[in-house]
Amino acid sequence: MSNYGTTRHHPAAAQKGVTDYHTTLFRRLSWEGTVPLEIRVDPQELPANSERGLECYFIQAPRVSYLPLLMPEIRRFLMDVVFDETAAKALKEEDWWFEADDGTLLKWHWPIGLIYDNHSILATVRPGSSLAGSMATPLRLILHLASPPTDKLLLSPSAESCKQAFMGQLKEADFIRWGNTKRITGLRKVDQDGLWEGIREHNFDDYWRVATKVTPTTTPNRSQSPGPPPSSVSMHGRPPSADNAGPPERDGAYNVRSVPVRVYLPDGPVIQDLVPPLLEDGTPHTLSHFLSTHIPLLFPPRPPAPPPSRAKPNPQAPSVPELAYPLVQGVLTPLESEMAWLGACLAGADGWLNICVGVNKK
């Protein structure tokens, strides 16, 4: 387990460009997250003389990693335990590919955590399954050893293709934030390669040493901010606007043109739209506002409170049914969370804030 206390900085450090303690904490927590995978070789493709019954491999995979980066570890296990040495020599790792146990092709360019969360929300619309059950069991994958369906896979199943896709996602996220890609393209090649090496080696410090140059800070943009929340509010639900406001930062999360966001629906399309950090009235753009605007059937807007009367001098707004819920980095995310803060603290390593929407069953 990582020692989170080592990331604490002096309060004045934030004004010197050093990431504050709480931002680093949430980034590290999401970085250190893992998901359980059960990887089983297709029994029809096992080489001759293989040890049948041992062709299943379990792993806690980093959420920020990618399936092609697991191949060396999986191959070592299969070569040492399962495959016959002579027959295994004919296998080519570039021909290996994955599908889910229901026959769904897996997208190599998606982070493993996103693949897992997307599978979890799919379970919420299938009979006899639930989110709790799907997130408590490993994601079962079938490993094929030959004949990759190149006509259906968006990318060739290789680490190099995955790296190219990762860099492409970084540039797209950079453009959405700032209106250009100067922050990414302006990096030295050694730094651009260092981003991918941080992912490949799962090294938080190496990755964020470079990523801090392109990722917005969480310093609020507003000169006045509300007081601290009630003591009953958890730190995890505390929006950054509740912190003491300092001087606005040009690279702050509330100064970006838009937050790079994608919404994943179970058995539905991926929604992508411009998400300004602040609304037209200057208030923070919250997750509740974003979801009720784009998916009102699942997140109906809360109607305003009725006017006060003698019987009810302080009327409350009527409640709305909880038809669905958002998952960010595998965590049920409070709807009052601010999009700018989520984009700065809980975005994936590729710069994108991925929101998976599950459906509550009645």
Image (cartoon, grey):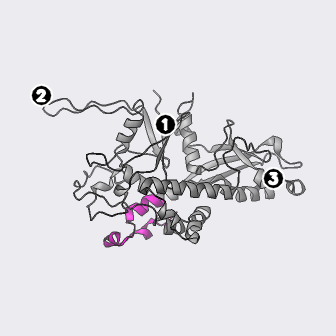
Assess whether residue 260 is covered by the magenta stretch. Answer: no
Disc 1 to disc 2, how far (Cα)? 39 Å
How far apart, in angstroms, are the residues tagged by discs 2 and 3? 75 Å
> Which of the 4 quarters of the picture holds residue 125?
top right
Q: What kind of residue is marked 2? A: Ser
Query: Would you call the spot at circle 2 few (<14 residues within 10 Å), some (14-19), or many (20 or more)?
Result: few
**Image point 76% across, 54% down: which residue?**
94
Camera-side residue: 241 or 166?
Answer: 166
Secondary structure predominantly adopted by residues drawn in magenta:
helix
Residue 285 position within the rendered picture, expressed as x and y whole percent measured from the top left: 33, 46
Which callout, 1 or 2, points at the residue further toward the start of the chain? Answer: 2
Can you give x and y, in whole percent of width and height, for residue 7 in the image? 43, 68
Query: Which residue is labeled 3 in the image?
Result: 82
State yes or no: discs 1 and 2 in contact (Cβ < 8 Å): no
Image coordinates of residue 171 in percent, x first then y, are 52, 57
For the point 15% across and 34% down, the residue is 314
Residue that appears at 44% across and 41% down: 326
Mark nearer the viewer, 2 or 3: 2
Q: Which residues are magenta?
A: 1-28
The residue nearer to you, when weighing 222 against 258, is 258
Mark 1 / mark 3, whichever is N-terminal: 3
Q: Which residue is mark 2?
A: 309
Q: Which residue is mark 1?
A: 358
Pick the residue in front: 181 or 218. Answer: 181
- Residue 249: x percent and y percent? 33, 64
Distance of mark 1 from mark 3, alpha carbons? 38 Å
On residue 217, the disc is none
SS type, badge 3: helix
The answer to whether 176 appears left or right of 194 in the picture is left
